[in-house]
Amino acid sequence: MNDRILLCLCHMSGNEQRFIDEAFADNWVVPLGPNVTGFEKDLEDFFLRDPDLKISPEERALLERKRTVALSSGTAAIHMGLVALGVGRDDEVMVQSFTFSASANPVTYVGATPVFVDSEPDTWNIDPRLLDRAIADRVEKTGKKPKAIIPVYLYGMPAKIDEILEVARKWDIPVLEDSAEAFGSLYKGRPCGTFGSYGALSFNGNKMITTSGGGALICPDEEAYRLVLSYATQSREPFPWYQHERIGYNYRLSNISAGIGRGQMTIAREHLAHHRAVQALYRSLLADVAELELHENPGNDFDSNFWLCTVTFTDGAAVKGDDGCGRPEAMRRHLASRGIESRALWKPMHLQPVFASSPAYVNGVSEDLFSRGLCIPAGPWVGEPEVRRVVEALKEGLC
Ligand SMILES: *Cc1c(COP(=O)(O)O)cnc(C)c1O
């Protein structure tokens, strides 16, 4: 047994193998097949047709119209969302700066430029007022409107999506949600990923559920679903020969990976409950540690999946071994010496060399969080003994 505690390790329910065996038995070892359709249905039942969702009849009707396409990654899902929205060369897309690079990379795949917008302190996600001002400035500077808005739900925390949608409506710009980290997170009772025109999900190995690698795009209706499906399968037209009228992509999820996804969906709710229980345990054990602040839901409208738990060092806090490397890095090294994996928060995109030439609207929030925050282990392999060990090690690392 390995007693290292890792950030977020995938966990198989035991049902995955059955779906994979079926695929082999039927020789469906290809990027389509019953597991792909089955997984899409599982996702739709979970995100769009869950009778237990506490939403209005209007919202329910809106969700009922949506469809979900299974794709080869979350990055592919964001790329397909941009293609479906008609984002192209020389366009601009407003992107949350405080995120993983995969939120912004696909913007460059279509020849567009990401314009980064900073976060607000309570959700850590895109600041709706700064977004509004940034769009106004882009319109003034370039003479045209940005083509899309990509908010992110960092570490699963819902963004203030109502206010973001209000800005989007005001400027008439579509929203593509990067919900890669927010599987099962709710905002006002409605799943993250179902608010915008499109919503991207990721099933990479470290996410809430996994297909080893994979993603999905929640589409507004059947027509958009068909369009994305076509793009993702090389834009084949319905002819007896290979006929193409648009440039296509090879982005469909394989029937084997989808089999893992179907297995994971049988325990998705258990995973979610577990992540929330881990957060609750950190909450109680860190309650009397003034040096550390656990990132929490900022109000009743927010219901994070707590994909990763995160802490920030408060003003007076000092960490042993901080030789100028910064408190998060000093604590990361200390935890590593105790067999515990932790990681710095996402380094904002506007600080990344690769995006140095992209416009950015910055308010200091993401830079401040990056300088004093740390991701600590969560996930299916982290139980009460592990959380206790992490908290003890954290305390020990403080001066
Ligand atoms: C993981 C992730 C992605 C990309 O998903 P992949 O499936 O790894 O391609 C996109 N955005 C964010 C915020 C992510 O965390």
Image (spheres, rainbow, N blue to C red):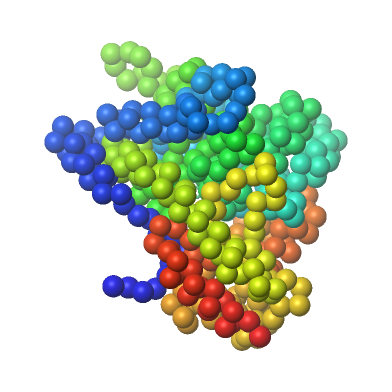
Tell me which residue sits at (51%, 21%) in the image: 64
For the C terminus, the quadrant is: bottom right
Question: In the current view of this chain or complex, which residue is farthest to the top?
Answer: 239
Residue 180 horizontal side relative to residue 40, left or right: right
265, above or below 171, in the image: below
Tell me which residue sits at (52%, 38%) in the image: 200
Question: In the current view of this chain or complex, which residue is farthest to the left?
Answer: 25
Q: Nearer the viewer, residue 229 or 368?
A: 368
Residue 279 horizontal side relative to residue 255, left or right: right
Give the x, y percent position of residue 170. Answer: 79, 27
154, above or below 107, in the image: below
Tell me which residue sits at (45%, 54%) in the image: 274
**Residue 246 seen in the current view:** no
**Residue 362 seen in the current view:** yes
230, above or below 327, in the image: above
Give the x, y percent position of residue 37. Answer: 33, 28
Q: Quadrant of residue 173?
A: top right
Q: Which of 298 and 328 is in front in this view?
A: 298
Count of labels in the image: 0
Residue 156 horizontal side relative to residue 34, left or right: right
For the N terminus, the quadrant is: bottom left
Tell me which residue sits at (57%, 76%) in the image: 394
Give the x, y percent position of residue 341. Answer: 47, 71
